[in-house]
Amino acid sequence: MTARPAWLTCLETDPPALLEAALWIAAEHEPTLQPAQVMREFANLRQQVAAGLPNLAAAELAQPLLRRLGELDFHEDDDLPVRPRAALLNHVLQRRRGQPLSLALIALELSQRLDIPLQAVNFPGHLLLRVPGSDHLLDPCNGRRLYTRDCRDLLTRVAGPGAELSARHFQVCDGHALLLRLSRNLCHLHGADGDHMAALKDAERILQLAAPTSADHLLRAAIYHELDCPQAERFDLERALLLCDDERERVQLAQRIDQLGQRGRAPALH
């Protein structure tokens, strides 16, 4: 029987322990990591942040919180190419550099401990934050306020000039969606870094966090292809075929499955 992932237990608490869950995800890649110890040390950061906040109502403290993190040298990781450490929360806390999602997870944990209302917004390519009921969003990397025009400009930068801003870009991101997005980030970064075994762990977590899709099985199939595991690759291609609604893609998948079957047939001995 497969052991229950610790990050899933964290996700199911009320409220979800998102930062601890992210640390347990990091521990899947670095077995010596002790999330409980990192969470104890996080109390020091909470004290540093609280000491620098102005005397304002809780609903007005979200932007000062993000700016305080900037004063403490938390910034977006500008390494190119971006490395997995920009999404692994233990490294983000240590280096004070990370992706917008990683910085947002830290801010959300602090806001919860300091009773500051704050939500994650599932904006494409750059996770954003919002105070419930406010007329603007907040950039977790620097605390800058983003209004509609700013969001349109940001969407153009991350998705191209043809992207159109819509209501779906402003949906609140719950705990499952945040960890799913984190896992997708890690899968991409580990794959780009050539660590396909690490990417496989992330791909399997993606399938645990949400209802499987054709794209998710194709992602894992691509990783199995890099690892030269044709039987596992075939399994995911077959699942992708079952979940695919596009007829042209179904034909292409069937051809790929057939080609794998031909590869697996040993030549006759004479």
Image (cartoon, rainbow, N blue to C red):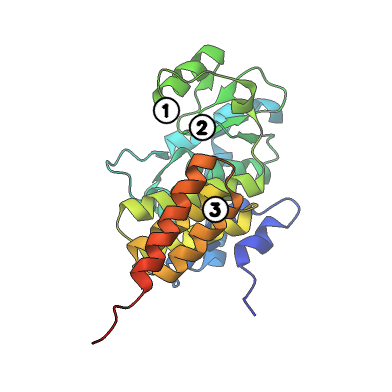
Q: CA distance from mark 3 to mark 2?
A: 27 Å
Of badges 1 and 3, nearer the viewer stands 3
Whole-percent x and y of residue 242? 60, 54
Q: Is 134 in front, or is 7? A: 7
Check disc 1 and report the residue beneath it. 158
User: Is residue 255 shown left or right of residue 66?
Assistant: left
**Residue flagged by tag 2: what amino acid is it?**
Pro
Q: CA distance from mark 1 to mark 2?
A: 7 Å
Question: Looking at the image, is mark 1 or mark 3 earlier in the sequence?
Answer: 1
Q: Quadrant of residue 199?
A: bottom left
Q: Which residue lies most toward the left here?
A: 270
Check disc 3 and report the residue beneath it. 241
| Residues tagged 1 and 2 counted as in contact (Cβ below 8 A) | yes
Check disc 2 and report the residue beneath it. 124
Label 1 Cα crowd, 10 Å radius (few <14 / some 14-19 / many 20+): few
Q: Residue at position x 56%, y 58% from top?
A: 239
